[in-house]
Image: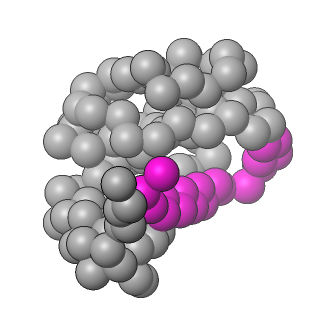
């Protein structure tokens, strides 16, 4: 049997994320991301998305964190749907790990989600 993901369908799925008021969370956990993750390892701050945009089958979500809310080193970040400002609330759509050291600067996290069929 042959099958293919339909571009328009993938674009519609991506567009569903935008109006959900996603939240961006950051933390200090260093565990390897897994498809079974439901929360960040060690969430330290969370903010509602400051902007979302949809382009084709990709959604860009940005979250702004004043320096006073950020740990010395950010190790993980995640995108949460149907969530609140409370840590570990909502459904995590994606989790990534990357070491960032903001120093005394504020932080703008951008998470890019591409909706594709595998």
* Residue under the image location 68 percent in, 22 percent down: 32
Horizontal side, residue 108 vs residue 55: left or right: right
* Residue under the image location 41 percent in, 83 percent down: 55
Picture coordinates of residue 48, whole percent (x, y)? 32, 52
Q: Is residue 111 magenta?
A: yes
Q: Quadrant of residue 68?
A: top right
Q: How is this picture coloured? A: one colour
Looking at the image, residue 4 lies above or below residue 20: below
Picture coordinates of residue 16, whole percent (x, y)? 20, 64
Looking at the image, residue 87 lies above or below residue 117: above
- State how many labels appear: 0
* Residue under the image location 26 percent in, 44 percent down: 81
Which one is in front, 20 or 86?
20
- Residue 33 appearing in the image: yes
Which one is in front, 104 or 76?
76
Region of the chain picked out in magenta, as a range: 100-118
* Residue under the image location 26 percent in, 26 percent down: 89
Horizontal side, residue 98 vs residue 43: left or right: right
- Residue 70 appearing in the image: no
Quadrant of image for the N terminus: bottom left
Q: Farthest residue toward the front?
A: 1
Q: Is residue 89 magenta?
A: no
Q: Quadrant of residue 33?
A: top right
Picture coordinates of residue 20, whole percent (x, y)? 18, 57
Looking at the image, residue 81 lies above or below residue 50: above
Picture coordinates of residue 19, whole percent (x, y)? 18, 66
């Amino acid at each position: 049997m042959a099958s293919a993901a339909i571009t328009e369908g993938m674009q519609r799925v991506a567009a569903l994320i935008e109006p959900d008021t996603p939240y961006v969370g950051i933390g200090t956990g260093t565990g390897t991301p897994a498809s079974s993750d439901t929360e960040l390892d060690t969430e330290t701050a969370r903010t509602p998305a400051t902007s979302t945009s949809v382009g084709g089958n990709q959604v860009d979500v940005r979250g702004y964190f004043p320096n006073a809310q950020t740990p010395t080193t950010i190790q993980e970040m995640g995108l949460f749907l149907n969530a609140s400002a409370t840590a570990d609330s909502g459904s995590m759509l994606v989790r990534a790990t990357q070491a960032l050291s903001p120093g005394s600067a504020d932080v703008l996290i951008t998470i890019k989600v591409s909706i594709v069929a595998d």
